[in-house]
Every structure is written in C-alpha cells, then in structure tokens.
Image: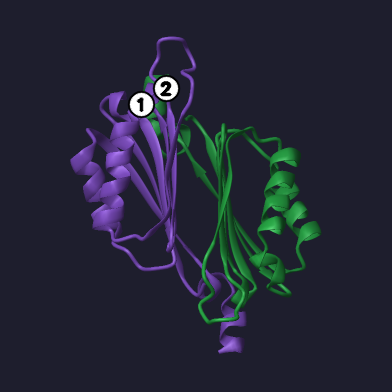
Chain colours: A purple, B green
Amino acid sequence: MDYGKHLILEVITKDGKDLASIVKMREFFDLIIKKVKFTVVVKPVFYKFKPRIKGDLAGITGMCVVSESHISIHTWPESNYFAFDIFSCSEFDENKVISIISDLFNVEEIYSQIVERGLRINFKRRFIKGA
Amino acid sequence: MDYGKHLILEVITKDGKDLASIVKMREFFDLIIKKVKFTVVVKPVFYKFKPRIKGDLAGITGMCVVSESHISIHTWPESNYFAFDIFSCSEFDENKVISIISDLFNVEEIYSQIVERGLRINFKRRFIKGA
C-alpha cells in the first residue's frame, strides 16, 4: 500500500441514547458506506456490551471490513462519547464523514485527526529506492 | 472512555508468503490476545482478497473485537507490507506487541506510532470541568 489515510474521530454528543442503539449504528455505517463510497467485503458486525452499572445504557462496538480497509466505532453512552475510525487505501473526503456525523447525531464537539500511512509515507527512502 | 491507547504499526517483512496465510494471521492474533491479555468478544474474522495480478499472493484483512476495543490487520504481500492496529481503553505494553511481531514474522523494518485518545486527552477542559 503506497498511501493510506486513517481518519481518527472522537465525538461528544449531547445525549447518550443513540450511542446505545444498534439500529442507529447500522444506519450510520450504511450512510458512510454509501456516501463515502466504500465497498463492503464483510458486513458490519455490532456487539453490545453489558452496561457498567445495571440499568445504564450499554456501549457498542461496530466493525466493517471494506475493500479499502476498515471502519470501526466504539461508543460509551454513559459519557456521551464515541471513537470512530476509517482506515482507507483510497482517498476520501473527511469533511463528508464529519458532515454525516453532524447530521445524524446530536453532536456537541468533534476532535479529528488524520494519520497518513503506507510505504510512500513511512518508508520513503525504500519507496524512492524501489521506484 | 477517559483514556485510550491506539498503537499504529506498519511492518516491512523480508518476504510476502506469511502475509497471504490466514493460518499465520490466526496464530498472530491468538498470540497477541494471549500475551497482551485481551478479552475476545467477537472472534477474529479474516478475509482474503483476490490477488491484484493472477497468480500473485493475495492480501488479508483481519479484525477482532475485544472488550478493550479492537485489533486489526491489513496485509499487502506483494509489497511485503502490513498495517496493524491495537486500540485499547486499557494500558498495554507496545514493546511486547513489537516483540511478538519480530519473533513471528521475518521482519525488515517496523514503523510505530501511538495515538492517545479519550476524554482526558482530547477534551481536557471538559474533563477537568466535569471532575
């Protein structure tokens, strides 16, 4: 892989209810896959944890293998917080992702980072030598 | 999640054969889970892609949901390259991970990064305010 873009998002929402809903998570992944144009190779898998304190909302982990790499989410509804990743060997528009999140969730704050990966990024000498 | 540690590794190996072997990938995940002490909640899933050029070795994607978060691998055997991630809400020793990789694969070079995540890291003001 010459170049990979890894979008690392952390999101604070105004309430935690959506972050405990597998239906909402599925809707979110479907939108990302459709609008950012990923090709699913292993359908999204969602796992709901037991709540930390009985009666509390429970966190969800979701993962999906796409031909470009992967998408993952981990939610902590008790903190109104989720961590979301897209790792892709194809270019994609992170602003589109952020806009989908802003439309779908009751967002308070988003922290976004991009980690560039791949032979051309982290093994440059080798890449040029081999060119 | 107050604190999360995301280990982002990129590895160049001396040959690509192991990177096209699901058996090897499974062995690798099992070792990581056992030695770095993760708790599996969704068993590892491995997907083998079709080779880019007929007769070439084919890349693999592997993902595993652990109670601490997730483990993922994407291999490109034609480039002797793989990208490996561990995202965990518990502390773990990245040197143990690197040492498992060095023992298991015919490694030429490893590029390692740690991205710290979580409320305490990226939403510090909020965290202190809420304390």
Mark 1 residue crowding within 10 angstroms, few (<14) / some (14–19) / many (20+): many
- Determine the CA span between mark 1 and mark 2: 5 Å
Q: Nearer the viewer, residue B51 or A38?
A: B51
Are the residues at dot 1 and dot 2 in contact (C-beta closer than 8 Å)? yes
- Expressed as whole percent of the image width and height from the top left, the position of residue A18 reads 29, 29
**Residue B7 appears in the picture as rendered:** no
Is B37 positioned to the left or the right of A17 in the image? Answer: right
State the mark number for residue A49.
none
What residue is rendered at 38% in x and 19% in y?
A57
User: Mark 1 belongs to which amino acid?
Assistant: Ala
User: Mark 2 belongs to which amino acid?
Assistant: Ala
- Expressed as whole percent of the image width and height from the top left, the position of residue B102 reads 77, 60
To which residue does mark 1 refer? A20
Q: Identify the residue at the far left of this view.
A: A103
To which residue does mark 2 refer? A58
Image quadrant where one finds the C terminus of chain A: bottom right
Relative to A88, residue A131 above or below:
below
Q: Nearer the viewer, residue A56 or B64?
A: B64
